[in-house]
Image (cartoon, grey):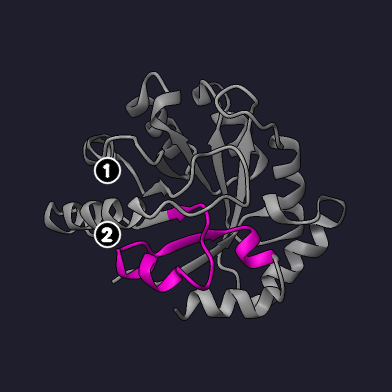
Amino acid sequence: MHPILIAPSLLSADFVNLERDVKRCEQAGADILHVDVMDGTFVPNITIGPPVVAALRRVTDLPLDCHLMIQNPENHIAAFAEAGADWISLHVEACTHLHRTLSVIKEYGKKAGVVLNPLTPLDYAYQAAEYCDFILLMSVNPGFGGQQFINSFLRRCSELRTFLDTHGLAHIPIEVDGGVKKENARAIIEAGASILVSGSGVFSGNLADNIYAIKNA
C-alpha cells in the first residue's frame, strides 16, 4: 500500500506571500508542493512558469510537483527541469509524442506522470503506465481552483488501481487533483489514490488541521 501524501496546491496560496505560505505548508506536514502551470490555451486560465518554480526551489526542500496544463508541453520540459521541478506531469491530449516526452522528463532525472481529465478514457493510462512514475487523475475539469469534486472519479480511480495492481504496476501511485477536502478524503483514499492535491481544501481555514485531517482520513 502506498503512503498517503498531501500536496497543497499553491494556486490557492497568497501569491503576495508565497514564501510564507510555503513555510506554513512545511510546518503543517505537507509532503509535496503542487504547482499548477496554465497557459491560457490548453486551459482558460494563465498562472505561472519556470521563473516562479526557480524562486520556489530556493525557499523549500519539498518536492515540487509541476502539473503542466499547457499545449505542447514537450517544448518546456527543459525549462521546468532546470528551474527545479522534481515531478513533471502532462495531459495526454496536449502532447503529440507522449512516450518521447515522458522519456525526456526521466532523462532529466525527474519523476514523470500523465494526467487524465474527467472524461479522458482510462486506456491512455493503461498504455502509458509502464513509462510513468505516477498517474494523475483529475477530479475536476482543469483550469481553475475551487471547483466541485466530480464523483465519477471514485469509480475511475478504483478501476485504474485494480489495473495497476494486476498488471505488475502496483508500485505506481495515483494522484488526485480537484475538489479534495477533508470531507471526501476517506472515499478518495479507499478508491486507491494516495497522493492528494488540495488547494482551497487546505488553505481555507486552519491549514495544519486541514492537512492532518486529509492525511489521516
* Quarter of the figure with residue 173: bottom left
Q: Distance between the residues labelled 2 and 1?
A: 10 Å
Q: Counting residues from the N terminus, which is met first, the one under dot 2 or under dot 1?
A: 1
Query: Residue under circle 1?
Result: 129
Q: Magenta segment range?
A: 176-203
Using the image, tell me which numbered label, if any, was put on residue 1.
none
Instruction: Please give the name of the residue rendered at 27% of the width and 55% of the height, measured from the top-left corner.
Output: 155
Q: In which quarter of the image is the N terminus?
A: bottom left
Instruction: Please give the name of the residue rendered at 29% of the width and 40% of the height, measured from the top-left corner.
Output: 131
* Quarter of the figure with residue 99: top left
Question: Per the image, is 201 magenta?
Answer: yes
Q: Is mark 2 on a helix, strand or loop?
A: loop
* Left or right relative to 19: residue 82: left
Query: Residue under circle 2?
Result: 171
Q: Quadrant of the C terminus?
A: bottom left
How far from the left and from the top, in percent, is residue 114? 39, 39
Q: Which residue is outermost to the right? A: 16
* Left or right relative to 159: residue 31: right
